[in-house]
Amino acid sequence: MVPSGQVVEKQEPAGPGPDPELKSWRCLVFYLCFYGFMAQLRPGESFITPYLLSPDKNFTREQVTNEITPVLSYSYLAVLVPMFLLTDYLRYTPVLVLQSASFVAAWLLLLLGRSVLHMQLMELCYGVTMAARIAYSSYIFSLVRPERYQRMAGYSRSAALLGVFTSSVLGQLLVSAAGVPFSTLNYASLGLLCCSLLLALFLRRPRRSLFFNRAAAARRGAAASELARMNPAEARGAWRDWTPARMLRELGATAHSPQLRLWSLWWVFNSAAYYLIVYYVHILWNVVHPTADSASVYNGGADAASTLLGAITSFSAGFVKIRWALWAKLVIAGVTAAQAALVFLMYSTSSIWLCYLAFVLFRGAYQFLVPIATFQIASSLSKELCALVFGVNTFLATVLKTIITLIVSDKRGLGLPVHSQVLGASERSWRALVPGRLGNTHMCDSRWSQPRQDLSGPAGMSRKMVTGPLGHAISHGGLWPPSAWSPDTLRLVGSTGKSQSPSEGAEWAQPR
């Protein structure tokens, strides 16, 4: 009984939200954003290629193009899947510490290394940092309630973009105005990276993650061995609850939407071409404008301008309101054609300023479509499926990029000079726009949503195989078409009103 005069407080049902110890989420989000800003302060990064080709290191352009830079693609592919799984299993913070430590190791090798092997190890460490970016992108969602996801993801991404912009401008001012040598610039980068490593050590480790830490055992209230003794039949089917098996089942259920396949195919091919250009553009600039005067190298300014334009176009894409189911192919074709023309301009021009301008516009065009593609892919998926789909997308895009690197760039393959590689990228982009390829691809046809027996291809073609974009044969029976994952997490609200949180959107890494 309740004594008179006392009011019984109504018990509110416990709803989903952050853990009790995360009530100070504002401080945690601010600290994470500050860490994201500091981790991007590497003023020497825009000038790594001129530094390697300078008398301080004295590597040849062929060594940088065909022996050192390709290792970045190989290492990224090797560690991508383990890093994706470890990020979720270890709950973000250890992976962020590993990322910061790998940055420090990369710059130590850059400054102290003297051989090609040392520079290849440097690229290996840098590949680890690229794969670990997913930890920063997804960490924000463990700190706040779902209704705050969109705004908080915008804060974390803006902090990283601001760090890249500040780093590029600072590096360019130090080189052009103060005449600071490249080696001093890289020592300054090393000092700033050590500061970001210290900041990473104090990031709070959350209790939950998307896949491996759902507290399933606590909800069941019994150990797996006890359940096995109580119900052997359930134990035999326990494999279905195994995390990788559950992830694969969820992935297979997402492969039925034509729009999902269309944007994923765009993402895999465009992202592969984009990052190949980003990896090698500084070498191209050195070919177009070879100079021993560091004050006349404006790589930092080009990186800063491309970052700023990318942020503007990415932001403006959120205000584009058209019927994407009707106009998506036309928009993709138009943007891809513009990118191909800009890449061809970089190949053909002898003016470094036109080359800078073409790269800035090329990067802005890519960043314009990234948030649109992210929304189109994520609007009908849950938070967990978004992370999984973008993870698979990233892996497949990296495989494609690595195959191209091995064949075209590596000295064990064709070992082509950078100009020929840029021309090849432009030609591949143009071939994607040949009538009957992108605009009429069966992979994106609405008939694919019908039963399997109605999906026969053109006359004489096996039901199991159709021709996708770029003329590649794509299996109809697979769980997922070739896709790509861009590594920055965005919080999006789908057309159904349900919040989504894919795990990576536009990249903020500077070209090297």
Image (tube, rainbow, N blue to C red):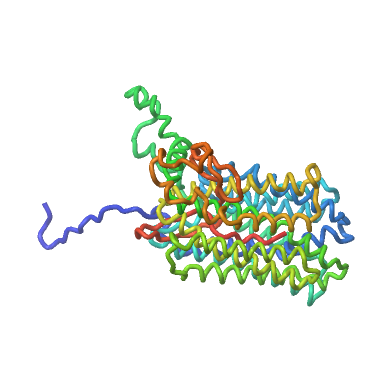
Q: Which residue: 79% across, 75% down?
A: 176
| Location of residue 75 in the rendering, given as x and y in whole percent from the top left corner | 69, 45
Q: Which residue: 39% across, 36% down?
A: 217
Q: Is residue 381 left or right of residue 409?
A: left
Q: Is residue 189 left or right of residue 256?
A: right
Q: State which quadrant residue 213 falls in.
A: top left
| Location of residue 438 in the rendering, given as x and y in whole percent from the top left corner | 55, 55
Check the picture and name the quadrant holding the C terminus.
bottom right
Q: Residue furthest front?
A: 459
| Location of residue 467 in the rendering, given as x and y in whole percent from the top left corner | 56, 45
The number of numbered badges drawn on the structure is: 0
Q: Is residue 306 visible to us here?
A: yes
Q: Is residue 188 visible to us here?
A: no
| Location of residue 419 in the rendering, given as x and y in whole percent from the top left corner | 79, 58
Tell which of 149 and 414 is nearer to you.
Answer: 414
Tell which of 436 and 286 is nearer to you.
Answer: 436
Q: State which quadrant residue 403 falls in.
A: top right
Q: Which residue: 82% across, 58% down?
A: 52
Tell which of 114 and 325 is nearer to you.
Answer: 325
